Image: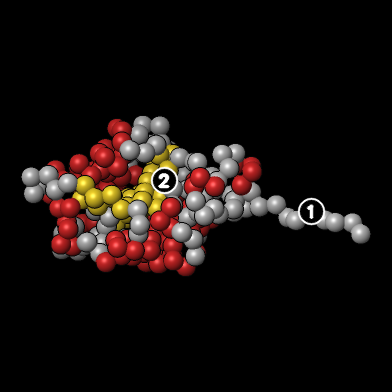
Amino acid sequence: MSEAIFLSAGVPDPKRGPEYALTADSVAITAAVSALVHVTLGRRLLIWGGHPAITPMVWAVAQGLGLDYGNWVKLYQTRHFEDEFPEDNQKFQNVTYTEDVERDREKSLFAMRERMFKEHTFGVAVFIGGMGGIIDEFKLFRRLQPKAKILPVVSTGGAVLKLSERVPTLGRDLTDDLDYIALFHRNLGVSIKEERYKRPEDQPPNIDQRLWQPPAKTHS
């Protein structure tokens, strides 16, 4: 199976992060998250830390594709926010709940992120919109997954604008291209011809073997 893709995304709250909300484009954030799920589901394992605004977006696209999304998405959630869990958590069969560390928000989030990054090998991390938590995830991710590609979708605004300053070489399309499906196909190396599989273990290890092939012509 291919290396996992990490999603770090959020819709900035004007009250908690006014500086991030000022530049964020909520329509672009929704479009980018939806496009990422569309491109990856059934092709790559997608992992993220539960965010009440993002989880319903992932669920909506996953349901529309008609695949067993529980095999292809993995959600991590700290019990520190147990009273705020979105109802969509219950729809994903693949949720890992991490401990509420000393009832402390930052300690609990750190424990969740550390476990998430240590339990998987990631090929790419995609950052969309967000507030300060995205920058925290970026720092820890880069330390624990130094070989992974960093993909900040700058056009979505929010904390990604600050994060992009820490990534020396960025493709111009991450700022200018609003065709997010094409952008992710290109930057994640996922061919539009790549088949979707019911389960990761059904996926051939060789990418060439996953590509759709026209049926062989028969000669009568």
* Residue that numbered label 2 is attached to: 5
Residue depicted at 27% across the width and 57% down the height: 51
Q: Is residue 98 visible?
A: yes
| Mark 2 residue type | Ile
Quick one: 148 or 163, which is closer to the camera?
148
Residue depicted at 40% across the width and 67% down the height: 60
Total marks placed: 2
* Residue found at the very far left of the displayed protein: 102
Q: Pinpoint residue 57: horizontal percent, then vertical percent.
A: 36, 64
Q: Earlier in the sequence, mark 2 or mark 1?
A: 2
Residue depicted at 25% across the width and 39% down the height: 114
**Local SS, label 1:** loop
Quick one: 190 or 170, which is closer to the camera?
190
Q: Quadrant of the C terminus?
A: bottom right
Q: Is residue 132 visible?
A: no
Q: Residues within 10 Å of mark 1 (few under 14, many from 20)?
A: few
Q: Are marks 2 and 1 in contact (CB under 8 Å)?
A: no
* Residue that numbered label 1 is attached to: 216
